[in-house]
């Protein structure tokens, strides 16, 4: 069987960076990129050894990379460092203590700012509270919090004392939290009484209480007071942070961590089975987060950076906490929903804080498009200079909207491809160098030996879609799956027997200029009459119709064609049963892609099933489309009610 994915969408628009942007960018010549990239692959030890020395080490490393026990890598062996000291102490020591680190805004409109010096004090105090409760180096600590400054402090406080943080997104259920606490064998949980979301209090402590009923290994629940809502209390286990903080000082020297000591666990759900505790260690991760944030977001001294992700995802770990802070930037942090109190909230924040670099997800961009241009147009976004996208392939329609409406047709968009497992961005435009193209992740970052392979491991040629593979270890790579070395090998390193190559699970193609276009998860590929189509491209075609807000496309078994295309479509202006609407959409796909892509069925719907991070759950749609009983794990779905609606409805 050929693993080729036919590439059917043709995108020819190109947007080079403006002269102005280019002249001020950290990297601004293609030759410079090529030189650095070539060195990073040919002599990774020299390249990464030099980059690593830009960070303050407590003890210098002896060896850059040891890959002799592949796929278990060891980077910067012999070196000692502390991630919180890289994010805080170095800036204070270098005279940047008075620079704002965080400009935080709560959903109700309350504000708190912290300079790097203030943040260092708060983190020191936080770390001392953890120590006073008996948390030690190497212990695992679960963090389940809203997007308040104490979330960043909690993460950095763990890093400061060498405890391993395991942040669980605050939107997960008590059951999901309990599973993760159990798996990581956590001894403490940090939470808050509640958090604000669309004007309501999310009762976080209550969820933790439910989870802890089955987690006897947790000796401490540390609770931040955020909303003042009523909470139950266990005198032996529960501690108010503000009370404990009065008992300790703010001076807490950073623990000297070995480069390969675990910095954190972060759980990611596979399509089946229990969530995987992805392990990231200290030295390599920090070097990767630092360098990628610096070059891809082109960070400058005067930037006001805003990544709208939650710290509960890898995006928040690498591009809210560690990457930006290692670079000493000023950043905006926001607690609540993008439509609270109204649909202009993000643009209002951008205008008032003078945001210059803005990083968000395609799912958010599509929501903004649906809410209407007027919410963006009301605001002065002229300070913005760079936009980013992450999380899933961005359809060209959304990309163009983002560029025009938010970016004023002036800001480059970096479409950044990476994964929880990769720790940092792997494929992305470099904004001062690359002409960007709608839907194109562009160039491999330094040290990233990306290739498109077929099932046999042969490299495919230009414009041939195949499996995205990473052929060399990189500093911020995962170090394993917590407690399951076999699953680590099987999932990521066994796709091509005999080759130590990382399989990302995504399909992609490289165009004749060598740029990468991500086609989505390979389990999202449909095979119609021997043509392997990326669901993403059919979705992009649908969404380019003015009457479509969002679309998800899956395959269902078909006697004649192998698989047939089923499209779930959210129409602009509500669901109708007008057959002409369906016909028009179907014709549109044929017009955009060709006859082979004509959907066998189009179902109009009000909503699509999504994970809490906003990814469409195509595996559920596949079951629905083929009339199968649901056997999938539903613990990560954001909106379970939508499933019944989809099953009942046949347009
Ligand atoms: C998967 C990883 C990386 C942080 C957030 C998601 C998809 C991610 C892109 C992009 C196309 C993308 C891939 C990847 N993905 N970014 N720019 N273009 N696809 O982290 O939950 O670990 O998911 O997200 O399918 O494998 P994650």
Image: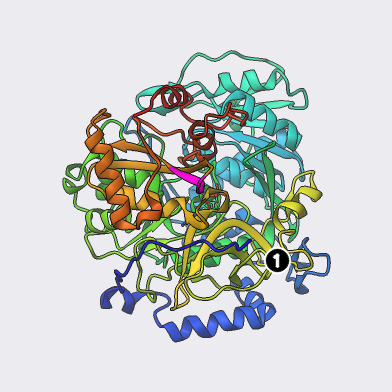
Is 518 included in the stretch rendered in magenta? Answer: no
Q: Residue at x 77, y 55 (%)?
A: 489
Q: Residue at x 58, y 83 (%)?
A: 38
* 201 is higher (above) or lower (below) than 296: above
Determine which quarter of the picture holds residue 239.
Answer: top right
* 420 is higher (above) or lower (below) than 179: below
Query: Residue 325, can we see it?
Result: no
Q: Tell me if 65 is positioned left or right of 616 in this view.
A: right
Magenta stretch, main secondary structure class: strand
Label 1 CA crowd tier, 10 Å (few <14, some 14–19, many 20+): many
* 606 is higher (above) or lower (below) than 157: above
Query: Residue 608, can we see it?
Result: yes
Q: Tell me if 280 is positioned left or right of 617 in this view.
A: right
Determine which quarter of the picture holds residue 367.
Answer: top left
Tell me the quarter of the image containing the N terminus: bottom right
Circle count:
1
Name the residue that disc number 1 marks. 501
Q: Residue at x 41, y 49 (%)?
A: 361
Instruction: Give the x, y percent position of residue 107.
Output: 36, 32
Instruction: Give the x, y percent position of residue 586.
Output: 31, 45
Instruction: Give the x, y percent position of residue 45.
Output: 69, 78
**Relative depth, front residue between 368 and 649:** 649
**Relative depth, front residue between 477 and 4:** 4
Instruction: Give the x, y percent position of residue 96.
Output: 46, 61
Q: Tell me if 528 is positioned left or right of 593 in this view.
A: right
Secondary structure at badge 1 equals loop
Specify whether tag 1 is near ligand 1 (CB below 8 Å).
no
Q: Report the span colored magenta.
A: 560-565
Tell me the quarter of the image containing the C terminus: top left
* 67 is higher (above) or lower (below) than 404: below
Q: Residue furthest front?
A: 560
């Amino acid at each position: 069987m050929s693993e080729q994915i036919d590439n059917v969408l043709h995108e020819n628009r190109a947007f080079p960076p403006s002269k102005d942007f280019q002249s001020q960018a950290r990297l601004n010549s293609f030759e410079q990129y090529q030189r650095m990239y070539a060195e990073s692959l040919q002599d990774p030890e020299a390249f990464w050894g030099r980059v690593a020395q830009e960070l303050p080490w407590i003890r210098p490393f002896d060896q850059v990379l040891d890959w002799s026990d592949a796929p278990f890598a060891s980077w910067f062996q012999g070196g000692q460092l502390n991630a919180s000291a890289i994010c805080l102490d170095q800036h204070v020591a270098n005279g940047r203590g008075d620079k704002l680190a965080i400009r935080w805004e709560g959903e109700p409109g309350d504000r708190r700012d912290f300079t790097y010096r203030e943040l260092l004090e708060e983190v020191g105090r936080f770390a001392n509270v953890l120590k006073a409760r008996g948390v030690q180096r190497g212990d695992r600590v679960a963090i389940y919090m809203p997007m308040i400054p104490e979330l960043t402090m909690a993460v950095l406080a763990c890093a400061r004392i060498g405890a391993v943080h395991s942040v669980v997104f605050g939107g997960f259920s008590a059951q999901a939290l309990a599973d993760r606490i159990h798996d990581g064998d956590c001894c403490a949980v940090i939470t808050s009484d509640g958090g604000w979301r669309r004007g309501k209090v999310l009762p976080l402590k209550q969820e933790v209480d439910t989870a802890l009923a089955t987690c006897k290994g947790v000796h401490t629940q540390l609770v931040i007071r955020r909303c003042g809502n009523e909470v139950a209390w266990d005198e032996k286990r529960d501690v108010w942070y503000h009370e404990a903080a009065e008992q300790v000082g703010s001076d807490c020297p950073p623990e000297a961590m070995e480069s390969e000591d675990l910095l954190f666990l972060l759980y990611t759900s596979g399509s089946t089975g229990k969530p995987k505790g992805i392990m990231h260690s200290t030295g390599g991760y920090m070097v990767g987060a630092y360098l990628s944030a610096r070059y891809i977001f082109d960070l400058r001294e005067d930037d006001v950076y805003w990544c709208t992700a939650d710290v509960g995802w890898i995006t928040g770990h690498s591009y809210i906490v560690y990457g930006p802070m290692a670079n000493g930037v000023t950043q905006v942090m926001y607690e609540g929903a993008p439509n609270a109190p109204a649909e202009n909230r993000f643009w209002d924040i951008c205008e008032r804080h003078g945001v210059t670099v803005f990083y968000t997800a395609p799912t958010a961009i599509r929501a903004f498009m649906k809410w209407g241009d007027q919410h963006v147009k009301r605001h002065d976004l002229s300070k913005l200079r760079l936009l980013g996208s992450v999380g899933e392939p961005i359809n060209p329609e959304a990309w163009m909207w983002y560029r025009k409406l938010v970016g004023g047709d002036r800001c480059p968009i970096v479409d950044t491809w990476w994964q929880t497992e990769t720790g940092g961005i792997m494929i992305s435009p470099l904004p001062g160098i690359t002409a960007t193209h709608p839907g194109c992740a562009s160039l491999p970052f330094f040290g990233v030996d990306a290739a498109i392979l077929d099932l046999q491991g042969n490299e495919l040629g230009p414009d041939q879609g195949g499996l995205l593979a990473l052929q060399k270890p990189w500093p911020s790579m995962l170090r394993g799956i917590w407690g399951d070395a076999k699953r680590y090998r099987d999932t990521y390193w066994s796709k091509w027997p005999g080759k130590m190559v990382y399989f990302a699970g995504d399909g992609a193609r490289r165009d004749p200029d060598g740029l990468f276009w991500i086609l989505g998860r390979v389990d999202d590929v449909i095979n119609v009459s021997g043509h392997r189509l990326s669901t993403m491209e059919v979705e992009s075609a649908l969404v380019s119709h003015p009457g479509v807000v969002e679309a998800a496309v899956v395959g269902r078994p078909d006697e004649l064609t192998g698989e047939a295309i089923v499209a779930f479509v959210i129409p602009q202006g509500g669901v109708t049963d007008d057959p002409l609407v369906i016909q028009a959409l179907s014709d549109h796909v044929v017009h955009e892609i060709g006859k082979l892509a004509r959907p066998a069925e189009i179902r109009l719907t009000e909503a699509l099933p999504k994970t809490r991070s906003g990814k469409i759950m195509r595996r559920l749609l596949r079951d629905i489309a083929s009339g199968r009983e649901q056997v999938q794990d539903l613990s990560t779905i954001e909106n379970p009610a939508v499933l019944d609606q989809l099953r009942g409805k046949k347009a």
